[in-house]
Image: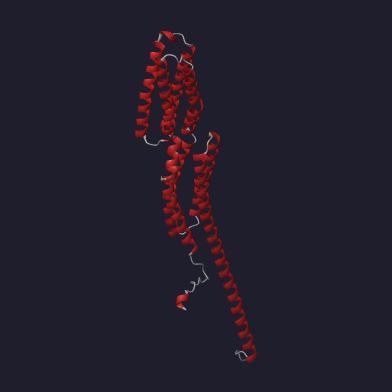
Amino acid sequence: MSLKPGLSEARWIAAGAVLLLAVMWVVIHFQRGQSAAEQMALQARRLEAVHQIGLSLASAAEAERSAVMAITDEDSQMYADQARAASAAAEQACRELEGLLEPAERRLLSQFSQPFAEFQRIDNEVLDLAVKNTNLKASGLAFGPAAAAVREMDTALARLPSDDVKIVRLADDARIRGWRVLALLPPHIAEESDEKMDAMEAQMTAEDREVRRSFDELAALPTLTGNADLKAAMASYARFCDLRTQILKLSRENTNVRSLSISLNQERRVMLACRAALMALQQAIAEEPVAGMTIRRPVNPREL
């Protein structure tokens, strides 16, 4: 009995081999396609994470600026809370992204982490200053009760007897110098330089000394002994001086001016570094090759 296959049997064997090869090709092709799909899904997930980090970073910076510019303590605190929450979200997204990255991409993420840590440090400093609102509070006192006290002093001095030249001269001198002291408060509140604030305070002290001298001379005049208007003027000026002390203390803290300066200068530079690092990471992830897929370079018209 011959063991060699006949022609028909050989054909069946050949057909079976072809079918087996076809099935194997389909299985391998399907597995490769599934691997590519998984890689693309992971790539998309990483790109989305980078995008979310950028959005959270931008939200933190925007909320911080709102906290700096807010005019009430409540609004400043609300925006500060939003800024800290957005910064925390960016930090959490970084931690999640790190576990999805290749070693080379982790190095790019570390290049973002460095300026981001500096951003968080500056952000906390700015927000701590912004919620205090000392410059705004100083302005409210200066344009409110302090200005009212000087007006009351001015009105009371204007009611003193006008038939005595000395009384008129001393009263006018006190009135003018009182207004000068008040006028120096707003620029002091807005000033960032300690040296310039020192100069303004020295000028205020000189004007204050002359106001008090005029009051002392007026009080020494026999015709003004027990004068109710003079007493009212002196009481108003004393109240103004107490308010001025509070205003200068708040102004010296300079929290609004300092927070705005830091936000516009230091933080802006750090933000640019953060964005550049994120763009480099995003580009590296987007250009990562996917198994089984060929990325064709766009045709340059000049090469045609």
Residue at the image point whose x is 40% and y is 24% from the top: 177
State the image coordinates of residue 37 (x, y, percent, origin top left).
57, 65
Is 77 left or right of 191, judged from the image as shown?
right
The picture places residue 30, in percent across and down from the top left corner, at: 59, 71
Q: Residue furthest front?
A: 163
Residue 272 lies, in percent from the top left, at: 43, 52
The front one of 25 and 200 is: 200
Residue at image location 37% in from the left, 20% down from the top: 210
Q: Is residue 121 above or below residue 19?
A: above
Looking at the picture, the colour scheme in use is secondary structure
> Horizontal and vertical percent for residue 250?
44, 29
Viewer-side residue, 160 vs 195: 160
Q: Residue at x 63, y 91 (%)?
A: 7
Q: Quadrant of the N terminus?
A: bottom right
**Image-based side of 209 in relation to 23, left or right:** left
Q: 238 and 73: which one is in front?
A: 238
